[in-house]
């Protein structure tokens, strides 16, 4: 079967983008080697695109002792799997493999995080995050405190909640637009360097 | 029982806010008569706050023939009720009552939108929106087309999806922070003017 | 949109009611200022109406140290919200506001009772009641004993179960008949007296 | 294992019952050969017991062309199975076998009514009844009309809804009190007469 | 209504079976007095039939101190009830009644195993088995250890998992083929011998 | 984190296996380049192992016009994803990539088969298979007929049901034993040959 289009909604040509978005997209493309489709799909709504990428970077480009960049990507993988979101599982699974330097962890977390070989801290994080994703009213104050007991700061705890919340948005947008992951993501981080 | 605090996370004093947020908050307070707690609760994370309110305004401060401001608020009420989100149901229920000039519609939509006295167009909109909120993988291309058949433009259809997605974020953040609605919201739009 | 009829089933004229029902309805109307639609909707089935109101009054018109009238109304609000029953949430929410002298509590309990500012006793009561409403086979003997530990007598515990069970009936009947709440209920108990 | 008691709540001695209940119980016992435990378990709450049995008899002791006594029992069996209610499945299963003169139908309907050898009319009835039992907000006006198309009168349609609603009460009460079915019910209607 | 056929798929005549299956079927028929329909329904696929009955006998024809033959049948009854499988509930319910010499236990376990009069050991077994049947990813290592604490050997624990897994297969096959239970099963083990 | 063991249950040394299993395992290992862990994990129960692999091969090593070997693997991937089974998603995803000569299809089907670029025939197959996996009582005769309308023979339709049923067993066994996929599976079929 031929692959479906990137999105159910219009994808503007690159040369028609507002200058700030064009710059941002060029920078991402240079760094990654390709432009992830979420950029293309959001471009027809410049204000929403700007807010989306600002929020994304504020949450994901951050490394703390309690929540590494790899940990943040695994929150995305686990909660996006709850929502059966192909784009987010595949794209953030790729980033998670690279950041964790582990070719197996993304699939392990996406399919069955409960048995994945992770620290007790990350099991506690994913327990809270997947509950917030699936049944938000059921998250209790005691669960937030359990994260502090595992060494997360108040800022880290907020990040667990906000990353999960932000990808609750992303997963739904990706389903609604039938956003297609770039082919590059499927193999990234699976083959040992130097091979 | 005494009321719980506004949020489980720090709420910075108004005079310590960055200038742009302080201005925005002052403007909202003047227009509404009080500052909704979501502003106070997000203020400790200025970048996320800016992105959040930009996205919100881009989606909600818009009136189109296919999707009025009142219609947009009712999408928020219906999908936030799916997530049992007190803040969003109460705050956006208040705005919905005012924008729709109907003192009953917010409760009708929050508790049982399927029997609410709405147009076939809005029933189709809420059918798609509540499915996207609850079971995003189940939304089909055919459902998006059904919205066009009811007169929504492509932009309106996107807005249905993006509003629902944005409040999937808001509902989860509000649950995670135990965000408390301002008392003012409960009565707004219920008492006929001139009374 | 114009409002739908009171019920999908016949509503007999007041002057054709059996004498005992006519008397009861007149008394309710005098006390409340209007006749709640559940009375009108059940009137075409006099035997069922008599049994229904007898059961209702036996359970709800009772004040005990372990379970006040306001507490009983909040059980109705919380379990009717589980069932998305507009009539019961709106009508009993109104009574709950009045009996608890609290303009916020009904909405708080209807949308998210777990975070509502209630006593530990009432949290235990609503935990059991909402489980009985949603998943009756899962209620355990230990849960009933937890209510006794909060000071409920054996009679109070039964009342928690029987009120929940009775409104499992009412909620379904209200959905089946598409019973519409009287407009008066929406505002009752929200405006401070003397205003 | 020894059998548990009839109920988690007090069961008053027969000679301490109010006269009207004592008479009713004696009559039932004479007709059935034993007193079903639901009578014993409700006796400590005479007002609720009177209302309960009045409602029960008004709905179940009725034979119409659109809904026979056996059909009514099968609604009870199917919806009580949705709620995993042992007392109602076993007791009303027994009555259903006798009224339908069919030793298999109660188990077939309790475990998997969708494949049970029933008329299209009864399949439509059980479709609506089990949805009302499990997910009451999802029952639509079109489904009620589908019952009329199968020959049910408006009274019959109401009975489908009210029987289901009444047993939503009974099932929950039976779970809450851990009501135990009388041993006699298990075998009733399974052995051909004359054997 | 007339009864439906044994299966939605072809049922080969007994005299066209491969010799080994014909022998096995004859032996079962002699021992039981009739040939259970699962044999007839699988016969058109001889390889699958051989594997199916080999697996079945390896798991069910075994008596250990930690898991008797009757216990094994009750695992089948409880987990098949989770899947609403008429054939397995009725056929294995019959065998359970006979092996447990208890005319009530099969119905008690099928409808509401949580309140069934069973040992703490069997309650722990059914807790794990029904969770594995309904939500397999949620079974934890700690739950398996809880079975050992109740005296099950490592082999017994495996058997709990494998019996449940095997009947997850059987229940689905029975639904897919609309497999009908033999009438004989409904009454087996209900009537005291010597009656 | 170090990887967990292959299984929670004993894994016998290769040189202690019964001769027929040792031969079968050696043959698989030679063909695949490694021995999949399911073989090792089942070896301590030789009778069950023999039945398991016989059933597996009878269903999966078959190519028909209506259901190719790749199609059969995709049924496994889709239904195992419903059950969050890491072993089956990863191992059969690998085989599916190879048999379909498509490096993307396994992830697409595992995460969101509804939007995967498959033929209408395979969408109908996965619709029935995933319903049978998740909610077996809901599969109707009409759905089986819909498969015939897509060109499946009666044998193919049975295979859809039996493959799904067999992996309902496998998924549960894999969860119960915490079966770990071999590392080789994760990369198989992702890298174009000749690279």
Image (tube, coloured by chain):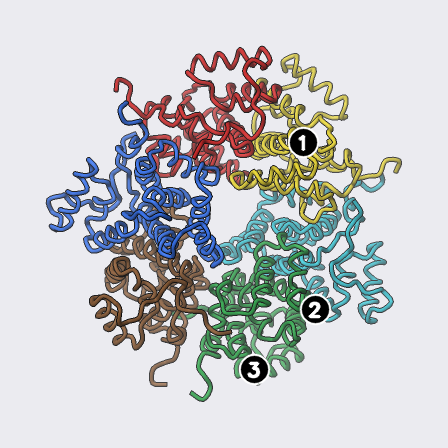
Chain colours: A green, B cyan, C yellow, D red, E blue, F brown
Residue drawn where x is 39% and y is 31% of the image: D121
Q: Residue at x 31, y 57 (%)?
A: F163
Task: Give me the C-alpha separation between circle 3 and circle 1.
Answer: 69 Å
Residue B180 location (% of width, % of height): 75, 53
Of all chains, the one bearing label 1 is C
The secondary element bearing badge 1 is classed as loop
Which of label 1 and label 2 is nearer to you? Answer: 1
Left or right, F130 with reference to C11: left
The residue that mark 1 highlights is: C153
Q: Chain of mark 3?
A: A
The residue lying at 69 percent from left, 37 percent from top is C74
Q: In this figure, which residue is indicated by the disc labeled 3?
A: A29
Spatial distance from mark 1 to mark 2, Cα to Cα? 44 Å
User: Looking at the rendering, which quadrant does residue F4 occupy?
Assistant: bottom left
Q: First in sequence, mark 2 or 3: give its number.
A: 3
Q: What crowding class fits label 2: few (fewer than 14 Cα within 10 Å), some (14-19), or many (20 or more)?
A: some
When asked about the image quadrant of residue F177, the answer is: bottom left
């Amino acid at each position: 079967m031929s692959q479906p289009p990137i999105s159910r909604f219009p994808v503007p040509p690159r040369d028609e983008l507002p200058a700030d978005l064009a710059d941002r997209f060029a920078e991402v493309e240079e760094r990654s080697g390709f432009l992830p489709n979420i950029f293309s799909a959001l471009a027809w709504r410049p204000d929403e695109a700007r807010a989306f990428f600002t929020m994304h970077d504020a949450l994901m480009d951050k490394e703390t002792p309690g929540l590494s960049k790899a940990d943040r990507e695994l929150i995305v993988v686990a909660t996006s799997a709850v929502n059966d979101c192909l784009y987010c599982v595949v794209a953030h699974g790729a980033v998670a493999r690279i950041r964790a330097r582990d070719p197996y962890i993304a699939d392990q977390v996406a399919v069955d995080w409960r048995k994945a070989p992770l620290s007790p801290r990350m099991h506690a994080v994913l327990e809270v995050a997947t509950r917030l994703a699936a049944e938000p009213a059921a998250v209790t104050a005691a669960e937030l405190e359990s994260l502090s007991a595992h060494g997360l700061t108040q800022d880290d705890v907020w990040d667990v909640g906000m990353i999960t919340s932000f990808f609750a948005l992303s997963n739904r947008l990706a389903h609604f637009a039938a956003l297609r992951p770039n082919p590059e993501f499927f193999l990234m981080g699976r083959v040992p360097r130097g091979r």
